[in-house]
Amino acid sequence: MNIRVNHIALLSGMVLLLFSCKDMPSKNHGPIVLGDSATIVTEKDPQRLKDLVTDLQPVIPAPENKDSTENKTAAAKDTAQKTKPAAPAPPAQSLPDVAGLKADFKEVSVLIPGLNAKQAGRPNLQNANGAVYSLISGNVNGSTIKVTGNITKVSQRYQTVVVLKNEMGTLMIESLSSTTDWEALKGNNNQYRITDLDTKSLDHINANANTIRNAVAKAAKRRRYSRRKVQEWVESVHRVRAVNQKPLYVMLRSVMWKIDGKDANGRIFSKQVRVDMPL
C-alpha cells in the first residue's frame, strides 16, 4: 500500500514539474557579438576537442616553370639547327657555250644563238642597264632568247622605218618611222621565242598621199639634194597611197628586249638589249 502511494506521489511530482517547465519563459540571448566573451562557449573536455577528420598531408610537387621549359626547348632546337650541316648551294645557272649574241649583266646573262652582232660602247656590262648591238648576220625572227637568273618577264618592242627605193637609189623616210609598245614574249625555262618580226607582220603608220609626199621631200632636203633632185624624189611617189606600197617598203630598223627579274637579294631589276638592223 505504501509502495503504491509512493509511485502516485512520484508521478504527480513529475507532472507538476513538466507543466512548470512549459510555463517558464525562454531566455533570449540576442545575436552573437564578435569579441564578446560572454557569448563564447569554451570547451574544456579534451575528448571533445579532438579532430574527427584525419589530417591530410598531400605531397604537392613544386610548380613547373613553363617559361624556363620553353626556353630550354627553344635553345635545344636552335642548337640542333646550328649543328645541322648546311644544305649545298644550288648550282649556278649558265648559258650554253654556243656562238651568238651575248650580254653579261651583273644580274642576268642574255644569249641569242645564231646572231652575229657587234656591240657598241663599253664591253663590260656589269654595271650597265642596257646594251646596243649592230647586226652583222643571222635571222632575228624565229630565234630564241635564253637568260639566266630569276626572270619574271621578257618583253619585246621594235621600230620600223619606211624606205624609198628606185632607180635614183635608196632614201630612208625617218618621219614615217613607227615604234610599237612593249609586248611580253611567250616562253618557259628562261627561254623565249622571238616572233612577229617578218615583213608581213611589221607594224607601220597609216599615212595618206599628201603626208607621204611631204615626208619624202623632207628626207631629200635633209640629204642636201638640189631642188631639182628633191622634186624628182617627190615625183617618184606621186601615185603612192600607203607606206607599204611600192616603191616604199616598211623595214625593221631595230628590235629591243626588256628583261625583268629579281636578283639574289630580292631586288627588282630591268635590263634592255637593242639590235639595230642594216638597211
Image (spheres, rainbow, N blue to C red):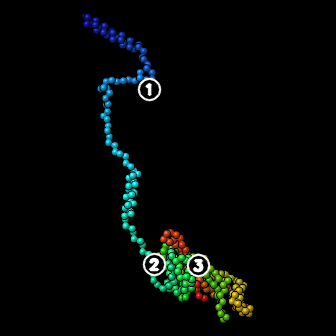
Q: Is 203 in front, or is 131?
A: 131
Report how far apart the C-alphas of labels 1 and 3 lie in the structure: 101 Å
Residue at figure coordinates x 39%, y 71% from the top left: 88
Disc number lying in front (2 or 3):
2
User: Can I make out residue 237 in this image?
Assistant: no
Q: Which residue is mark 2?
A: 94
Disc number lying in front (2 or 1):
1
Q: Which residue is mark 1?
A: 34
Labels 1 and 3 touching (C-beta < 8 A):
no
Mark 2 or mark 3: name the one nearer the start of the chain.
2
Q: Amino acid at mark 3?
A: Arg
| Disc 1 packing (10 Å; few <14; some 14–19; many ≥20) | few
Report how far apart the C-alphas of labels 2 and 1 lie in the structure: 96 Å
Q: Amino acid at mark 1?
A: Leu
Labels 2 and 1 touching (C-beta < 8 A):
no
Q: Is residue 170 left or right of residue 196?
A: right
Seen in the picture, residue 174 relative to 62 is either above or below; the reply is below
Where residue 274 appears, x then y in whole percent? 57, 81
| Disc 3 packing (10 Å; few <14; some 14–19; many ≥20) | some
- Which image quadrant: the C terminus? bottom right
Report how far apart the C-alphas of labels 2 and 3 lie in the structure: 26 Å
Give the structural element (helix, strand or loop) at label 2: loop
Q: Which residue is mark 3?
A: 157
- Quadrant position of residue 121: bottom right
Give the structural element (helix, strand or loop) at label 3: strand
| Disc 2 packing (10 Å; few <14; some 14–19; many ≥20) | few
